[in-house]
Image (tube, rainbow, N blue to C red):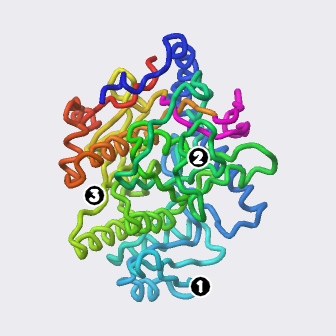
Amino acid sequence: MPATDFERRQPGQRAADKERLKTQLDRLKNQKRAHQFQSDLFRTIDKRQKRRRAPVALGRIDRSPQGDFLVALSGDIVVRSADAQAAADLLGRGYVQLKVRELDGKVTKFTKAGADIDETRLSVAALRDANIQATVNYVLPLGYIAKGEGGFENTTVSQGQFVPDPAGPCVAVAVIDTGVAAKLRNDGWLRSVPRGLGSVDPLYQDPPDDLLDFAAGHGTFVAGVIQQIAPRAEIQTFAAVGSNGIGSELSVAGALVRAARGGAQVINMSLGSETEKEEQPVGLAVALEIIDADARAAGTRPPIIVAAAGNAATSKKTWPAAFDAVVGVASLAADGTPSAWSNSGDWVDCSAVGEGIVSPYVEGREDEAVDKDDPDVFEVDAWALGTGTSFAAPQITGALAAVLCDEPDLSKDEALGRVLAQAQDLSAQGFGRGVVILPGTPT
């Protein structure tokens, strides 16, 4: 599937999109600015959560002088239920235990009202010192907390320029993200994606006005990438991350199990987080174990799970992409060379173009907190220009779905081998095997 098959823009359009791409790349490459943006956006989200008296308390975990940080839910500790009694004995009073039903009760969450992130981290450290697998309940953000720097820009692509191919469901694909916009598009794209409880992106949940929320449309864009490559895929969305870009590890882990048990053959997760000491998040690890056990019991193959590697120019492991059972995807420029801003490492399996991807988006106006310099207005049936590993990953997902449509009995390794048959070996640079599927926008 040559990239030229998917390029419908004229040379003049690509040139105009190139200027918009430059804005995205400048922001992603400027790590100092990106870290400041991340801090500012985190504070804004935190203030809005408190103003709404949201039950979720966010905690920031500082990690380096450069300003990198992680976000977790203050007071939340995640352990395997087999260790719950030992954990309770060590933690003492004040913690409430709750077995996570969506993970078959194999994970227990300990919550302490009023505990700040420092207390939570110290408690986790004490548990780990006692050989109890424990992590904080990490937030798995989209980009820099939300779409943020390097986020969506208007594109030259207009309604009707891309016509969706006729759908004919042959493989089930799940997108665990913000969900899909409820409003049906007039141009035919994504109309077959079910809209229902737990699958819709609210778009305007947090802001006090009619501005798009910080991560609004992320899931719509990702689903659109998949449909471009695998038009016959039956796409279902799971809104495990809020429109502000905040979703806990446990909410994503639960959605992962639901998607697999719902029959998904390929699952896309354009989200992820590093962890404090590169430890595996307990909830996600257990979710993958449940999915594997279900498949073994049924005598079937587990779904192929694909995840974005992240956009912070680091080699530190990003989860879930770094799990052995997950296909971790980094980003390439349009010419097939590694993106300077992309995460990379020996845990990355492959890479696809993640710079200047065009896909269906949502109607609305950006919040200035997301784009301080020039907030965009997106019209009805908008398309947008996106940059990030979030948009490289669904290309691998879509390509896998397209292969499985024709050869449904292929194993994960066989299907991935088909997708990467013409790939360039970039493993020495930490980008796995690089393949150009969607053309992106040349710089």
- Disc ID at residue 146: 2
Residue 150 location, quadrant: top right
User: Which quadrant is home to the N terminus?
Assistant: top left
Query: Can you give x and y, in whole percent of width and height, for residue 225 in the image?
Result: 46, 39
Are the residues tagged 3 and 2 within 8 Å (C-beta)? no
Q: Amino acid at mark 1?
A: Gly
| Mark 1: few/some/many CA within 10 Å (<14, 14-19, 20+) | few
Which of discs 1 and 2 lies nearer the camera? The answer is 2
Residue at screen point 41% across, 89% down:
85
Give the structural element (helix, strand or loop) at label 2. loop
Based on the displayed image, in which of its 4 quarters is residue 431 positioned? top left
The kind of secondary structure element at disc 1 is: loop
Residue that protrudes farthest toward the right in the picture: 209
Which secondary structure, mark 3? loop
The residue lying toward the viewer, choosing from 160 and 113, is 160
**In the image, what residue type sits under mark 2?**
Ala
Mark 1 → mark 3, Cα distance in angstroms: 36 Å
Can you give x and y, in whole percent of width and height, for residue 323 in the image?
31, 56
* Earlier-in-chain disc, 1 versus 2: 1
Q: Residue at x 30, y 70 (%)?
A: 289
Circle 1 residue: 94
Q: Nearer the viewer, residue 127 or 357?
A: 357
Residue 136 position (above or below residue 363): below
Q: Identify which amino acid the numbered label 3 is placed on.
A: Ala
Q: Position of residue 110 (x, y in %)?
A: 51, 79
Classify residue 301 as left or right of residue 204. Answer: left
**Which secondary structure class fits the magenta region best?**
loop
Q: Which residues are magenta?
A: 357-381
Query: Image height check: is 6 above or below 90?
Result: above
What residue did someone put label 3 on?
A: 325
The Cα atoms of the two marked residues, 1 and 2, are separated by: 32 Å
Q: Are marks 1 and 3 in contact (CB under 8 Å)?
A: no
